[in-house]
Image (tube, rainbow, N blue to C red):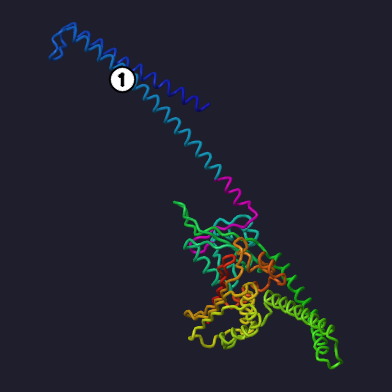
Amino acid sequence: MEESKKSVAAIIVSVLAFIFFGSLLAIAWNVAQGLFAEGGLEIVALKNTNLEESLLFYLFLVGIVADVFFSLFLFLLLTTYRQAGFLASRMTRDLLASREMFLQLYNNSPVPYLLISKDSKINLPNKAALRLFGLSAQELEDQNLLDFFLADDLDHVQTLLSRVKNGVPFHEEELQIVRSDGTVRWVIFSMFSFKSVPGKKYKSGLATFVDITERKEIEKVKTEFVSLAAHQLRTPLSAIKWYTELLASKDVGGLTPEQEKYLEKVYAGNERMIDLVNTFLNVSRLELGTLAVDIKPTDVVELMESVFEELEVQIQEKYFKLHKEYDENIALVNTDPKLLRMVFQNLLSNAVKYTPKGGELRVEIKKRGSEFHIIVEDSGLGIPKNQQDKIFTKLFRADNARALETKGTGLGLYIVKMIVEKFGGSISFTSEPNKGTTFKAVLPL
């Protein structure tokens, strides 16, 4: 209705303008006619009266055409102005509606959201965030985000926030926060940065928290169960091992060749079970944080060579080309030799297991500043591109690895990652299917 009124008004104004300027032209025509009649108007260089009257007539026609065009221009100008006003009004309404919808989605989302300022202050917490932290909007607003994390995690959190300030987001960091009532909750913490809005308080980024406390508690119960079951299995397995060794020694009587063959199979199967139980125990201890760390000066090169000795038979059977590069500047390193040996064992045994005969293995231990780098490279199966993001996941084995070797727990690289991170280091890899894989562990000296 409002738009129809504006259209009618534009037409009326245009018509009135046409009438007004037409009237002016008519008055001007009459005045000019009178002056001609009285001889008071004479155009220079035109002495013929008929020519003067014809010229005046043409000028009048030009005036009428100009009046029409001016009125049309005025009508188009008013119409365009009206349409622009209508479009601006509609865009404003749509923008306000979108903003209102966004705010409703933001406030009512089941995922806790916080806007974090440049100085780590909390702004605009949504309802889920208020429930997570156990505070009201007034109490949580302008609080320092760092105050809600455990003291042991503060350095790591500050590093993450610094990354966001430089435009680098982070995703799914598992951390613990302390609620207002003192209870501790496990959360998945993610954050990304965005540009500030003109006229608004500068925001460094949008933070999200996903409460995973219940999941962590379930995982803890499962880990404790696995640990208990593994402990209970060790005793009978140790007894089986003792009895098979006793029978194999022939101290209790001789065995037939066929009995010896079966006994060897029993012994080998029992050894695999012992290895599996020990692996589960190591995983459960690492996850529960009960695995004691014994830091002492360790010769890492000698430790690596001892693992090569363990795998010597398998390496010789496959005729591998070995390349070893040990930095002469690496002296004794303060680390846990038992845990570091597990890292070496898993990386090397995987390289040997999944590299075909005649392949190549390269091992490097290099000192780089305050760190030392361990590189294990093979020319084996490689890891499929679509499964590389799962390679450090517990119990995961790539499809091509399962097809080649049915035996395996999928825990080796999971243990490696946990140990390396326990030492304060990091591990990464590059891989090309059917060309090989390179693992690189970076550890502090």
Image check: 5 left or right of 339? left
**Mark 1 Cα shell of 10 Å, populated few (<14), some (14-19), many (≥20):** some
Q: Is residue 442 above or below residue 134?
A: below
Which span of residues is magenta-colored? 99-121
Q: Is residue 444 visible?
A: no
Quarter of the image where one finds residue 420: bottom right
Quarter of the image where one finds residue 221: bottom right
Quarter of the image where one finds residue 240: bottom right
Residue 116 is one of the magenta-drawn residues: yes
User: Residue 288: x percent and y percent?
Assistant: 69, 75
Q: Is residue 10 above or below residue 111?
A: above
Q: Amino acid at mark 1?
A: Ala
Residue 10 is one of the magenta-drawn residues: no
User: Residue 124: x percent and y percent?
Assistant: 56, 55
Name the residue rendered at 40%, 24% in the picture. 75
Using the image as rendered, state which of residue 197 and residue 351 is in the foreground. Answer: 351
Q: Is residue 314 above or below residue 21?
A: below
Using the image as rendered, state which of residue 266 and residue 134 is in the foreground. Answer: 266
Q: Is residue 409 above or below residue 121?
A: below
Image check: 264 left or right of 90? right
Q: Secondary structure at mark 1?
A: helix
Name the residue carrying label 1: 66
Outermost residue to the bottom = 251
User: Residue 292: x percent and y percent?
Assistant: 66, 82
